[in-house]
Amino acid sequence: MKILVCNVGSTSLKLKLYEMPESRVLAVCRIERLGSEGDSIFQYINALDGYEICEEKLTVADAGAGIAKFLTCVTDKDHGAVEAVSDIARVGFKATLSKNHFGTHEITQEVLDGMREWLPLATLHNTGYLQAIGRIREALPKALFVGVFETSFHREIPLSRKLYGVPYEWYESYGVQRLGYHSASHGYIADQLNNMFGEKYKALSLHLGGSSSVCAIENGKSIDTSFGMSLQSGLIHATRVGDMDCDLYEFLKSQGLGDEEIHDGFEKKGGLLGISGVSGDVRYLEEAAAGGNNRARLALEVFVNGIAHYAGAFYVDLEGLDVLVFTAGIGENSKLVRKMVCDRLKALGVKLDEEKNKEARGLAQIQSVDSKVKIMVIPTNEELGIARRTYEYGR
């Protein structure tokens, strides 16, 4: 069975075509800096014959445009992975949020309505997914669509760690609580740690990318996470503000800023981009900081301070720490951010081997011989987990 997995991020789009249940990858597509003017990167690889396309300095306006470009490549008569898009039987989505739908669900009209109802909590992501679902539905009207929602891994976090200090009736009536996200990634990391260390361990999973979060994992289960009810929470992100004072909105309005300007500052012009004035992409920030740009360096420091803040709090929740995991685009590739984080976490028994850190490629252990905590780089594979759940759905 051919299954397409669609992963829409805040600044990226990843697509993988699998043959299941063999878990064989047929084609891969990755688009970075989605929505940027003249700075998008499009990469397509046909895993069957090795044919590759890599184009830079493009304008890929949104997820719909990216999907259309991928479908053209994947059905190309010379280097396509399928003869027709109708060969794809199921589509799995790393879906973000839908009211009253947690875990894995067929994407029905009810699920879509739930995504729209909770659109204010995940505006960028749900908009992207709704657009992607609609675009792929046009091309694959007979395929089964399955949503693997990003809140699922955190459902067992104790209620005492999920409730806000708001009237309890808001929790009962509207579901107001900390939900958590990045379940596909943190859940995959938990699976990997289960295989490596068995069923007893205490770990911090640092998913660091365009959107970032910290998750405390004990014996394979999430016991706390940095995200709140919306994606506009937790760590600062590429362009989103993360945690902030809830009265800041009214204060800015009192200073003469309009609603659109405030929302843009919170969601599109905040985060690493807002502080640095350079970019929300850590690669550009590292380059600028190395060249003496103080605001770029400041953005990196604020980012790392936030990670250290949550890591320290979750260390208390876990009552210790066995493994510190770096994953996702920044976690897997930025040796500078890994070093800055580990330097901040020395009080927790974390001690980095700088040479191992510099040489790390793919799966790696980078702790020094006298570190009390294992430090690992584990490439996440969210798409494979989603492909498996999509294949198993309804069986």
Image (tube, rainbow, N blue to C red):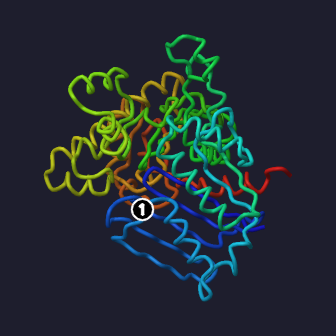
- Residue nearest the viewer, comparing 75 with 27: 75
Q: Position of residue 308 (x, y in %)?
A: 37, 32
The residue that appears at 36% across and 54% down in the rendered structure is 334
As displayed, is residue 357 above or below residue 55?
above
The residue that appears at 49% across and 49% down in the rendered structure is 327
Which of the 4 image quadrants contains residue 224?
Answer: top right
As displayed, is residue 137 above or below residue 242?
below
Outermost residue, left direction? Answer: 292
Q: Position of residue 154 (x, y in %)?
A: 61, 33
- Which residue is labeled 1 in the image? 61
- Residue nearest the viewer, comparing 387 with 370: 387
The residue that appears at 68% across and 73% down in the rendered structure is 85
Q: Position of residue 272 (x, y in %)?
A: 30, 44
Dot 1 amino acid type:
Ala
Callout 1: few (<14), some (14-19), or many (20+) C-alpha neighbours within 10 Å? some
Quadrant (top left, top right, bottom left, bottom right) of the N terminus: bottom right
